[in-house]
Every structure is written in C-alpha cells, then in structure tokens.
Image: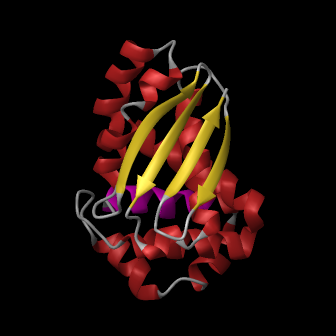
Amino acid sequence: MRAAHLKANVAQLEMLGTERKARVLAAIDPAVIDAIHQATRLAWLPVDYDVAVSRAVVSVCGYDGAMQWSRAATEDTLRSPLLRNVVRPALRLFRSTPAGFLRLLPRMLSTIYRDCGTFEVHPAGPHSVRIEATNLPHVIHDDETYLHGLGETFAMACELVGVSPSATTERRSDGHVTWVLTW
C-alpha cells in the first residue's frame, strides 16, 4: 500500500481526540507506526499495516466511529497529489454519470494498492454498478469490517459525482469479493 495513504490514515487519528487517538496508537505495533512515519510518501508498505490501523480504530471507536474516521481519511486521499491527477479529469468527464466515473476505480486503486488483487467495474443496471475483486490477500478478504469500509469508500467516490449510493458486500471463500453500489 502506498505510504501516502497510510500517512493520511494515521494523520486522521487526530479527529478522534487525544484520548481515543492514544488508545488507537497503543493498540498498534509501534514498529508499524514507525515504518509509516519513516516511509516516503511514494514508498510501498505492507497492506497489513492499513488493516492493523483500521482494526485498532474499530476496537477503540466501534464500527460507526471507524466509518467516520475512514471517510475523513478517504477525503484526504482523494484530495492528495496521489489521486488528484486522476480524480479531477475524471470528474470533468463523468460529472453526471457515476458508472462512468467508477470505471476509473481500478486505476485509482492501483495508485494506492499493490499486489492486492484485481478490481473490475461492471454495469449492474441503470442505477447500479458491480465492483468485482479477485485474488485479494487474506488479510483484506478475511476482514469483514475492512471490506465494508472499502464499499463505503467506493460509495463516497460516487458522492463526488452527486449521488449517494448504498453499498452491499458479498465475500466468497475463493478470495473473490463483490460490492454492489445502487443509487
């Protein structure tokens, strides 16, 4: 995973307040936090680090608190130099079509994730898309909350084009995950 994304996630711990941030950090291996802080923004770090941070936030803040934190971190990532050069042109091209905008999702994800499976976007109806992920690493595939957070992140991307979809997640035992976004 790109260190820039992990750095944004850790920076967003500030929104939790001093006490909860300290509890989250205490729940994460200090070597993980050190590696995130020491990495350059373009470095690649294990996706396990992001899952560890996410799990710690969920353990301290609960699911709803973790989704608020995830939303704030995602907003930062979407505005970052890492994705800005993909998101801005896509918004100009696909401002009125969430399905068109989401076709660029695999490209956006490839700037953040490496060796984390393959993502494809398919139309699922006039107001829905299906996002298929194959060959996900076990650390992602086996974490229900992380998968749901990804679905919420995909839904948030739709908000950039003016719709607020619902997201459902289906996980199969073969490393395959499907999200359906409906607006």
The magenta region covers: 3-14
What is the x, y in percent for residue 65?
Answer: 74, 59
Q: Residue at x 42, y 20 (%)?
A: 91
State the residue in front, 149 or 122. Answer: 122
In magenta segment, residue 5: yes
Q: Residue at x 68, y 70 (%)?
A: 58
Residue 123 visible in the current orientation: yes
Q: Residue at x 43, y 37 (%)?
A: 121
In magenta segment, residue 97: no
What is the x, y in percent for residue 7?
Answer: 41, 61
What is the x, y in percent for residue 36?
Answer: 36, 71
Task: Please identify the dominant SS of the magenta region.
Answer: helix
Image position of 178 with respect to 86: above or below: below
Quadrant hosting residue 64? bottom right
Colour scheme shown: secondary structure
| Residue 79 placement, left or right of 155 | left
Q: Residue at x 45, y 34 (%)?
A: 122
Image position of 26 with respect to 69: above or below: below
Count of numbered tags: 0
Q: Quadrant of the C terminus?
A: top right
What is the x, y in percent for residue 75?
Answer: 52, 41
Q: Quadrant of the N terminus?
A: bottom left
Quadrant hosting residue 135? bottom left
Residue 19 visible in the current orientation: no
Image position of 152 with respect to 28: above or below: above
